[in-house]
Amino acid sequence: MPVRVNMTFQRPGTWLLLLFLLLLPVFSAAQGSGVKLRTVVIDPGHGGHDPGAVSKSSKLSEKQINLDIALKLGARIEKECPDVKVIYTRKTDRFIELAERGNIANRNHADLFISIHVNSAKNASASGTETFVMGTDKSQSNMEVCKRENAVILLEDDYSTTYEGFDPGNPESYIIFNLMQNAHFEQSIAFASLVQQQFISNGPVKKSRGVRQAPLMVLWRTTMPSVLVEVGFLSNASDRSVLNQAASRQKIADDIFRAFSAFKAQYDSDAAFEIDPSLLASQEPDEPEEAAPAAAGPHFEIQVLASSKKLRNGSSELKGLTQYECRFINGLYKYSVGNFASREEAARQLPAIRKKFPGAFIIAVE
């Protein structure tokens, strides 16, 4: 019987940045032994002397919308999920550097990072919601978002030192983001997919532009599942009308909360994340999928890593593993360990494995 892992993804491309080990401090893992989702960091984009996108009339700014939605989202989580600690990167109209936003999440050992933004485009007909995860998709529309969101660093003091000479307007700068994905990629995609599902089903902005990848600075340094949510286009008359209404902003916050609630239920139970592939940007794989090996029967394994490129034996990414399964599924090389007869048996081993691979989770295999 062919292997079937109950997660569905399209190829994410090449992930993280080549200079990660040189530029970043080593943070303690966001997920520990047998953890539940206990801390979420909500990041209202822009603020202070950085207004973000601004309407033509200058009466409506992105920073105002972001903060309002973030506070509404946090209030809903605090009310309905009392076991979750909510931390904001800002609760008032103040400027926070991009690097510091991620650092706040890392210092607090957050289990999830949600950055809220409003989109804008030269083409006034562009509209809809989209949710980004850290990646290197260089399509024109995605790169425009990157340049706009990353340009915030130009407002920071000594940004060339903080970001190692990165220039948000220079496409060549984005080459530093080229490395394989991190351990939290699938969880980030899972949450992003849930957000877009809610927007499609319930959101006041009905058009969905899907789940996308982009080399976004605010997601770069986070060490947990992280997304950047664009809730609509301030440059589009219809979207702008929706975003200008407090009731609509509450609906958007409620949509993100429902996605959060569903994600938390999966996260806490170590359930496999199931993704609707129609929400993901289509990308052609570099090579055909390999035939999956036969398995003896239904069992459970613990997935420790996923990569867009096949790792060589002894790779530092494998952290000393010599016994593991590697399967090429939907454009990803997925590495797993163990062969457990039940989920309970796998769960007993999960805490020890998470000491080396904080993003490890249980998968069902047939």
Image: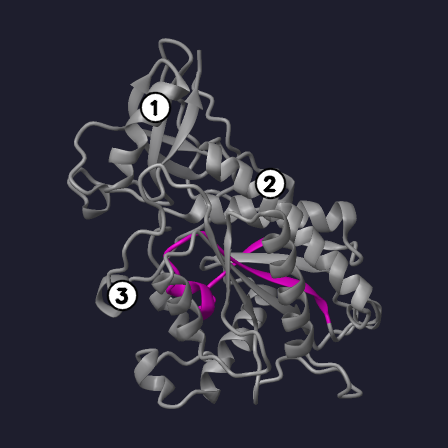
Residue range (magenta)? 211-233
Callout 3 secondary element:
loop
Left or right: 220 with respect to 85? left
- Quarter of the picture holding the N terminus: top left
Left or right: 199 with respect to 297? right
Camera-side residue: 12 or 202? 202
Of the image marks 3 and 2, the number of the one nearer the N terminus? 3
Camera-side residue: 293 or 77? 77
Q: What residue type is labelled 1?
A: Ala
- Image point (70%, 47%), residue name: 198
Residue 361 spot, x, y in % from top left: 39, 35
Of the image marks 1 and 3, the number of the one nearer the N terminus? 3
Q: Do the residues labelled 3 and 2 touch (CB within 8 Å)?
A: no
Q: Which amino acid does label 3 sit on?
A: Leu
Camera-side residue: 100 or 3? 100
Q: Which colour scheme is used?
A: one colour
Distance from label 1 to label 3 (Cα)? 34 Å
Distance from label 1 to label 2 (Cα)? 22 Å
Residue tagged 1: 346
Q: Which of marks 3 and 2 is in front?
A: 2
Q: Looking at the image, is 366 positioned above or below residue 163?
A: above
- Image point (31%, 25%), residue name: 348
Residue tagged 3: 19
Residue tagged 2: 262
Residue 215 spot, x, y in % from top left: 46, 64
Distance from label 3 to label 2 (Cα)? 34 Å
Q: Looking at the image, is 222 positioned above or below residue 288?
A: below
